[in-house]
Image: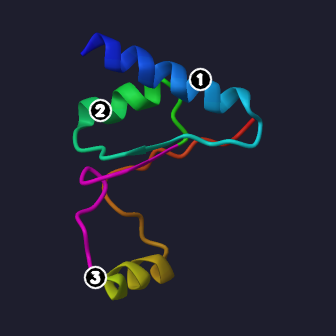
């Protein structure tokens, strides 16, 4: 939906205009959504595209091992 994309893009842009505010997209489920967010320079993303819900113990084990969740993460350095 074009209106939703415009609102999303400008919301992310507003976050970037505040030097200490990052943008986080929730509910990323597809490659297309990920690419759209990357195009808008979204800082972080989470959702089924990266990893399905899991018990906290499984998450902590992956975190301690330094293993990434999912295919690739939306993480951009803040200016």
Q: Which residue is mark 2?
A: 33
Q: Which residues are magenta?
A: 44-54
Q: Are marks 2 and 1 in contact (CB under 8 Å)?
A: no
Q: Which residue is mark 3?
A: 55
Q: Quadrant of residue 48?
A: bottom left
In the rendered image, residue 8, in percent from the top left (x then y), is placed at 43, 25
In this view, 35 is above or below 73: above
In the rendered image, residue 5, in percent from the top left (x then y), is placed at 36, 18
- First in sequence: mark 2 vs mark 1: 1
Give me the residue at 41% from left, 30% from top. Answer: 37
Give me the residue at 68% from left, 42% from top. Answer: 21
- First in sequence: mark 3 vs mark 1: 1
In this view, 12 is above or below 76: above
Please rate how many residues cluster around mark 2, counting C-alpha atoms within 10 Å: few if below 14, some from 14 to 19, many from 20.
some
In the rendered image, residue 11, in percent from the top left (x then y), is placed at 53, 26
Q: Quadrant of residue 17?
A: top right
Residue 13 bears which disc, if any? 1
In this view, 76 is above or below 33: below
């Amino acid at each position: 939906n074009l209106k939703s994309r415009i609102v999303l893009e400008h919301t992310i842009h507003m976050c970037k205009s505040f030097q200490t505010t990052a943008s986080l997209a929730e509910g990323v489920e597809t490659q297309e959504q990920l690419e759209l967010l990357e195009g808008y320079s979204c800082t972080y993303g989470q959702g089924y595209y990266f990893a399905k819900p899991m018990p906290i113990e499984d998450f902590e084990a992956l975190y301690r091992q330094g293993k990434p969740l999912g295919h690739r993460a939306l993480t951009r350095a803040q200016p």
